[in-house]
Amino acid sequence: MGFGQLVPFMPWLKRGFDTPEILEEKPTVRADIITQLVINWLEKNRDKHFFLWLHYFNPHSPYNSPLPYKKLFLNDEFYGKHNIDLPIKSGNFLESSIGDIPNFVAERGITNVDYYISQYDTEIKFTDAQIGSLLETLNKLNLIMFQSLWVYAIKNLVILIC
């Protein structure tokens, strides 16, 4: 759920801001695209006070990290530790998927749990690299002297107040 979708439920989110600007709100947009949108925005608005709420959808499924991330943890020292295959479950996105691999997550019929763990790990690594790029840009633009930066790693939420 993006900022624009939250405002009707929490109208106080807009309080004190001239214009909420929603750069991208599709949950399927990769972290590198979101990061580049934000970097472009920061370069144009660096002299203004701003509150930035940045929500990366990675590492939620479907896993769509680019190469070389996609293969980064395949066959590493942890790959194959579980050696468990689970059935692929067809059905609704909202249905429980305990003990199976939901159809919307399944890739090319792969049923091995270690594969999906490796793909989740690549999503974390990929998103971490994007947050690093954002911090490098903030430093380059002399915006690193911010008052507050929160990184909520589980939901990949970055909040920046300048």
Image: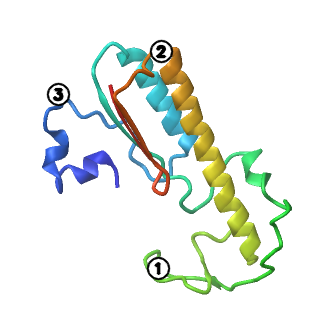
Q: Which of the labelled discs sits on residue 61, or is there none?
A: none
**Can the viewer see residue 62?**
yes
- Give how far apart the Cα atoms at labels 2 and 3 are: 23 Å
Q: Which residue in the protein does label 2 denote?
A: 141
The quadrant of the rendering that contains the N terminus is bottom left
Answer with left or right where residue 66 lies relative to residue 96. Answer: right
Q: Say which residue appears at 58% left-offset and 30% top-offset.
A: 133
**Can the viewer see residue 109?**
no
Looking at marks 2 and 1 on the same chain, the residue that comes earlier in the sequence is marked by 1
Tell which of 159 and 55 is nearer to you. Answer: 159
Disc 3 residue crowd, few under 14, some 14–19, many 20+, Cα 10 Å: few
The disc labelled 2 sits on which kind of residue? Leu
Tell which of 29 and 77 is nearer to you. Answer: 77
Mark closer to the observer (2, 3): 2
Q: Which residue in the protein does label 3 denote?
A: 18
Q: Is residue 144 above or below residue 74?
A: above
Residue 145, by quadrant, is top left
Q: Say which residue appears at 75% left-offset and 83% top-offset.
A: 85
- Give how far apart the Cα atoms at labels 1 and 3 are: 40 Å
Mark closer to the observer (2, 1): 2
The disc labelled 3 sits on which kind of residue? Asp
Tell which of 143 and 85 is nearer to you. Answer: 143
The kind of secondary structure element at disc 1 is loop
Q: Which residue in the protein does label 1 denote?
A: 92
